[in-house]
Amino acid sequence: MAFFIRNKMLGLTITLNTLSWAGLIMRDQYTKTQRIIVRVYGWLVFLYLFVAATYVQIADLIDIWGDLDLMAETSLLLFMELAVISKILTLIFKYDKIMEIINGTEDILCSENRLEGQKIIASIDKETTRFFQYYTSSVIFTTFFWFLGEHSSTFFIRAKYPFNELKSPGYEFALIHQCMMMVFTGYFEFNINIFFASVVAGCRCRLKLVALSLRNICINIPVNKKNLITPEEEKLITERLHCAISQHKYALDAAEDVKHCLSKVLLVQLTVSIVIICTTAYQMAVNKSTDTIQKLSMAGYLLGASFEVFLFCFQGQSLSNASEDIADAVYECPWYTLTQPLKRTLLIIMMRAQSPAILTAGGFVTLDITEYMAIMKASYSFFTVLQQVSE
């Protein structure tokens, strides 16, 4: 059985392997027994690292209810845990559909042999790899300074365990649990985010390849404004056009499936990000006792949450742009030399491209750069409210 899962896009290659080692991704080579073992292992990791962590943080939040400063501190990681839990559950319950999208995209990308197509794939792959690098650096930076900074509780994270965590062996258990929780929360957070972003980027890549096919629909056919195409050339163009239409339909279907798979979890992510951004900014602005190292950690946390929102808004905007570019690609081909039936077909494609593929949060918020700015403004508004309440 191959140790590594290979994919045309580096971002998916890395995240597919890391998530499979965590028991969240099933390899095709697994037997039925191996799948059961991996699934049990994945659920145990999920329960220990995330469900238990959420429980002790909610218990602490109830215990300190009314103290705004301590509540803001507890909320920082609690809401991040909730976002990770929603993503893991989405990955588990939507696994078959997501892998179907990935495998379909992989087949298309691997069969692409045009030089321009290879450049499109390389460009999008490079883009997702950069996102992976920036996000990884942010998580490592934040986690490192969080461990070094001072904290208002005995441990790294405020939590209330159902036992005395100040005496052995409760102390050792709580310490190990919190260290693992901090490391693996960041680990899962950026891996799953890049995984979902890469799936969206794959759909965008497919749409760009369709646009390339339409733009080059008459390639190697000598056409000009005076001489129309011959019957043999019309037959060849018709075959190419049918192939492009088929790929366009499958790409739009894949984008629609991605929207349905990620819609709910993205709504949770946007809501959580607003809370994290405003509470982190509140901690940095109001809590004067926080040491410099802890402020560096919270600054990285703030940038990471903002980058997370930008990642999906950027992918949503790029997906819509790639879908709309289909109409421009049709207009750029030498349509003026084609027969009336072919012109009508191209016109239908252009009309279909006027309703672009989109990425939504909850089915009613379209993710794009405009929405990103709206989210940042909303976060700032909640931050000013927290400041006023504190004063």
Image (tube, grey):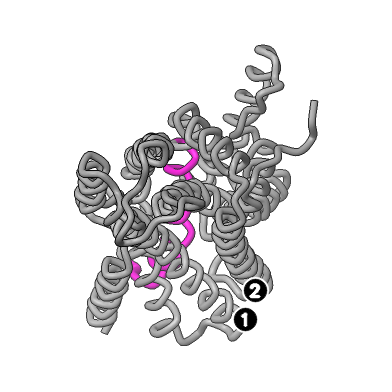
Q: Main secondary structure of the magenta part?
A: helix
State which tag comes first along the sequence, 1 or 2. 2
**Residue 3 image offset from top left, x and y in percent:** 79, 35
356 relative to 311 in the view: left or right: left
Q: Amino acid at mark 2?
A: Phe
Residue under label 2, please give it.
145
Residue 82 on the magenta span: yes
Residue under label 1, please give it.
293
On-image quarter of the N terminus: top right
Q: Which residues are magenta?
A: 67-89
Is residue 316 depicted above or below 306 in this figure?
A: above
Q: How many marks?
A: 2
Question: Label 1 to label 2, Cα distance in Å?
Answer: 6 Å
Q: Residue at x 64, y 72 (%)?
A: 141
**Quadrant of res 40:** top right
Q: Amino acid at mark 1?
A: Ile
- Disc 2 secondary structure class: helix
**Quadrant of res 64:** bottom left
On-image quarter of the C terminus: bottom left
- The answer to whether marks 1 and 2 mark residues whose Cβ atoms lie closer than 8 Å is yes
